[in-house]
Image (spheres, grey):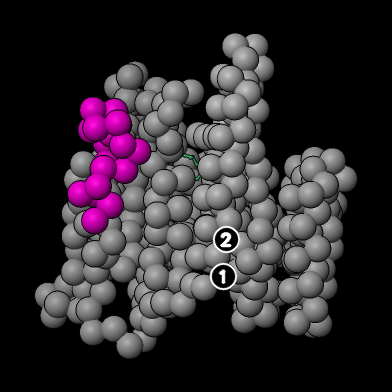
């Protein structure tokens, strides 16, 4: 790229980000589920094993929410077209009509979507997090028998992700990417984490950055989190670098002491996969993407194209998306239903053998086991 083109590209990015920052600062609309007559739940299949596990989630929803669906209090909207084939064909990470339909929902349960390596087609997740302004990525990891009860608050709209597809190849042998942090963007995720801690009897929040090296963006993230922490004097705050936190999670003598984690986007991405693995694998964890207006719930794992290629799709574990469904139910204030499903998942887990391979249980068998308990 010519120098002048690089400068122009960079100036445009800065301008876009200044505008985004203004939008966050002026944000207002918040959905109050206690006041809604009708809640629309969107269901999106996604790619690979997505349609298989979302179909199982649908069976659970149909049984669990039967009465409210019949009464019209809950509407289920199945939204198609968010497939890698369609996205490549239209060269749109989220096709316009799909986005429009998603925006007519209050909450969304989404299967994993494939993201191509390289190129310019952005990850559908990243687009949706941005378009629906889903700034808080909340990921619980619980292992009661090991006394582990972690909740991760990953910032979901900034950091390396926001311009991940807009870096520059300066020359054929040199490339630059960008990372962005704003005070408003950090403040809202920090508030979400501290509010959660306060409302759920948690005593500790761990802030995770690499502020010794990534000084400006991570430095701002850390200092804004500390500023917000002052409004919660009853909560103990600690600071960690992401490398040692990666070690802490597998350090049995220290890991039980952590409760709530507060992390910028990319570190949150990496650390939450590690945490899910500690819990039993990425197939076991759910993930909530929460904004003021919309919220989207999904499995923490990807679309597992290899399972499909090897003909093992039906052995995919639907547990992660079902845990996401638990979070969705909590979010819309269906607390009893959420608890009922959570318990049924634990019971189904005990009597199922999910190996991801022939010989183990299929997704359908897992759900059949689970449906006995609700
Ligand atoms: C996640 C996933 C996504 C991410 C991918 C699918 C874009 O890994 O939700 O953690 O990197 O955030
Ligand atoms: Mg991830």
**Quarter the C terminus occupies:** bottom left
Q: Secondary structure at mark 1?
A: helix
The part of the chain drawn in magenta is 82-100
> In 3D space, how far apart are the residues under numbered discs 1 and 2 (Cα atoms)?
6 Å
Q: Is residue 202 left or right of residue 322?
A: right
Q: Residue furthest right?
A: 212
What kind of secondary structure does the magenta stretch mostly adopt? helix
Towards the viewer: 180 or 306: 180
Q: Is residue 342 left or right of residue 248?
A: left
Q: Quadrant of residue 84?
A: top left
Residue 124, percent from left and from top: 39, 42
Residue found 22% across the figure and 57% down from its top: 101
Towards the viewer: 110 or 222: 222
Q: Is residue 152 left or right of residue 314?
A: right
| Residue pointed to by mark 2 | 21
Residue 25: give its label.
1
Towards the viewer: 2 or 215: 2
Around disc 1, counting alpha carbons within 10 Å, would you say few (fewer than 14), some (14 to 19), or many (20 or more)? few
Q: Quadrant of residue 228?
A: bottom right
Residue 88 on the magenta span? yes
């Amino acid at each position: 790229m010519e120098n002048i083109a690089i400068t122009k590209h960079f100036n445009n990015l800065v301008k876009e980000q200044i505008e985004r920052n203004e939008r966050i600062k002026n944000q207002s609309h918040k959905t109050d589920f206690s006041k809604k007559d009708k809640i629309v739940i969107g269901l999106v299949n996604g790619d690979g094993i997505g349609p298989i596990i979302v179909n199982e989630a649908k069976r659970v929803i149909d049984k669990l929410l039967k009465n409210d669906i019949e009464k019209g209090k809950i509407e289920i909207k199945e939204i198609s077209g968010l497939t890698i084939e369609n996205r490549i064909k239209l060269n749109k990470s989220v096709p316009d009509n799909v986005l429009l339909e998603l925006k007519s929902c209050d909450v969304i349960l989404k299967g994993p979507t494939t993201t191509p390596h390289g190129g310019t087609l952005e990850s559908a997740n990243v687009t949706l997090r941005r378009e629906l302004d889903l700034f808080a990525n909340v990921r619980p990891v619980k292992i009661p028998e090991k006394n582990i009860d972690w909740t991760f608050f990953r910032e979901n709209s900034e950091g390396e992700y926001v311009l991940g597809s807009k870096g520059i190849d300066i020359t054929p042998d040199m490339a630059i990417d960008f990372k962005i942090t704003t005070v408003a963007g950090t403040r809202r995720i920090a508030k979400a984490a501290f509010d959660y801690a306060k409302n759920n009897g948690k005593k500790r929040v761990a802030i995770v950055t690499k502020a010794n090296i990534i000084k400006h963006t991570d430095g701002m993230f850390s200092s804004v989190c500390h500023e917000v922490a002052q409004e919660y004097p009853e909560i103990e705050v600690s600071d960690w670098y992401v490398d040692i936190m990666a070690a802490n999670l597998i350090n049995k003598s220290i890991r039980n002491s952590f409760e709530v984690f507060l992390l910028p986007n990319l570190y949150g991405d990496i650390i939450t996969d590690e945490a899910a693995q500690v819990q039993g694998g990425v197939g076991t964890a759910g993930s909530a993407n929460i904004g003021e207006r919309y919220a989207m719930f999904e499995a923490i794992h990807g679309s597992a194209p290899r399972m499909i290629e090897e003909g093992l799709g039906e052995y995919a574990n639907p547990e992660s998306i079902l845990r996401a469904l638990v979070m969705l139910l909590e979010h819309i204030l269906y607390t009893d239903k959420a608890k009922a499903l959570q318990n049924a998942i634990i019971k189904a887990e005990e009597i199922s053998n999910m190996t991801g391979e022939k010989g183990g249980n299929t997704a359908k068998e897992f759900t059949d086991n689970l449906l006995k308990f609700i």
